[in-house]
Amino acid sequence: IVRNEMFGQLTSGLEAAWSKLKGEEALTKENIAEPMRDIRRALLEADVSLPVVRRFVQSVSDQAVGVGLIRGVRPDQQLVKIVYDELVKLMGGEVSDLVISKSGTTVILLAGLQGVGKTTVCAKLAFYLKKLGKSCMMIAADVYRPAAIDQLKILGDQVGVTVYTEGTEVKPSQIAINGIEEARKRKIDVAIVDTAGRLQLNKTMMDELKEVKQAVNPTEVLLVVDAMTGQEAAALVTTFSIEIGITGAILTKLDGDSRGGAALSIREVSGKPIKLVGRGERMEDLEPFYPDRMAGRILGMGDVLSFVEKAQEVMQQEVAEELQRKIMSAKFDFNDFLKQTRAVAKMGSVSRVIGMIPGMAKVNPAQIREAEKNLKIMESMINVMTPEEREKPELLAESPTRRRRVATESGKSEQQVSQLVAQLFQMRIQMKNLLGVMEGGSIPALKN
Ligand code: GDP
């Protein structure tokens, strides 16, 4: 299949994976083996870095095998959703906004190798910020290529943004300092400093960049990288991050026949977000990087995704309602604890389900996140409790012997068991409190 869409090859590569699950009734270790190989191959062919591919595939298979199927959703559709969620996570989850101060002149430093599209990005970025209502100035601190300065001036005229230059005889750091002073004088919102690009990364370039950075103390230091260079772009971001200290990357030429390796590797490899992407040669072809939209485009299965999400929501709603009934009846024991947290964990976020219970939206999100993290530890302790202990947590509160036994059998400390017991009572009270059905419950002191 020939595709013109971005990452078309990756999309078709992944499609092979879903197609192998048609007719299956569940996701099992056996039947996902081949689709996982397809996914792995598709990512490697897209030039995603190998360690990233390994972690990605591992994480997707772990989730796929453990997942409780959502009613009405086919296994292949559910795998699409798992891959989608992982792709979004891989690319950083949320959009990472540019930091622009509310007052004063914000300084953005642009760096990048020659030919990646840095000069173009400089003007595009000015145009983009102008559309957001910010006044801009571009500062030409690339003193090695007079042509680059001319090009920037032409683009500046095109987008109606002043270009500050001092020719090629002044030191870049000095030009940057002077330019920013001028921008401050004129009460410009954002000064974009275009630094020199070299054909190859070398010490002179790094040293000069360090000097400029030190001189102007920028809010954003953005490395412009070319999507066509795949995982190499991710390696560059890492190097600049370590050597210079950058706040993020701008990925250009995503419209070309780039395979996706850069977009998918940068965040995971370097720890730095992609903040903006260039998708064409026109000035308006620059936009924020939305991991969710990007993942959606890669999969090209918008309808499947929204269908699975709806089904997921219905099920989360049901779990939430069940949880609410338990709370209202003031009977919430370790069985419920286990059942609910497991069900919820399989479907995604505990906080989302909790948020669906009226009155529970106020539960401290940090507490919930902590609970999500501790889930595995808690599960292992609950697993070794006797049926009565699960139903009557009081038994554990009253007997240090029982708590010690649970600790030994689960390989956890007595303190962890005590904490878990206390937590259950605390949850009962908190929930009742929040729902306004509190009738003087209390946390029993654990007997020693
Ligand atoms: P610099 O050497 O890094 O300053 O690169 P330039 O800004 O001069 O760009 C190099 C070439 O890439 C030019 O021909 C640009 O038109 C082109 N270019 C830049 N950004 C994009 C993009 O997002 N998509 C496409 N297709 N071409 C781009």
Image (cartoon, rainbow, N blue to C red):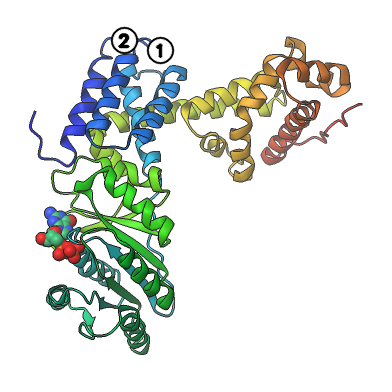
Quarter in which the N terminus is drawn: top left
Element marked by disc 2: loop
- Circle 2 packing at 10 Å, graded few (<14), some (14-19), many (20+), is few
Question: Earlier along the polypeptide chain: callout 2 or callout 1?
Answer: 2
Element marked by disc 1: loop
Q: Nearer the viewer, residue 147 or 79?
A: 147
Q: Which residue corresponds to the image point at 20% horizontal and 70% vertical from the top-left?
A: 123
Name the spot of residue 334 as percent of width and height, x first: 70, 21
Name the spot of residue 52 as percent of width and height, x first: 37, 35
Q: Looking at the rendering, which quadrant does residue 133 occupy?
A: bottom left
Left-right relation of 409 to 442: left
**Which residue is farthest front?**
203
Q: Nearer the viewer, residue 134 or 145?
A: 145
Q: Which residue corresponds to the image point at 71% horizontal and 35% vertical from the top-left?
A: 432
Name the spot of residue 319 as percent of width and height, x first: 53, 25
Residue under circle 1? 29
Q: Amino acid at mark 1?
A: Lys
**Which residue is farthest bottom?**
185
Task: Please indicate, yes or no, whether residue 283 appears anywhere in the rendered image.
Answer: no
Q: How many circles with numbers are drawn on the protein?
A: 2
Q: Quadrant of ligand 1?
A: bottom left
442 above or below 15?
below
- Disc number for residue 24: 2
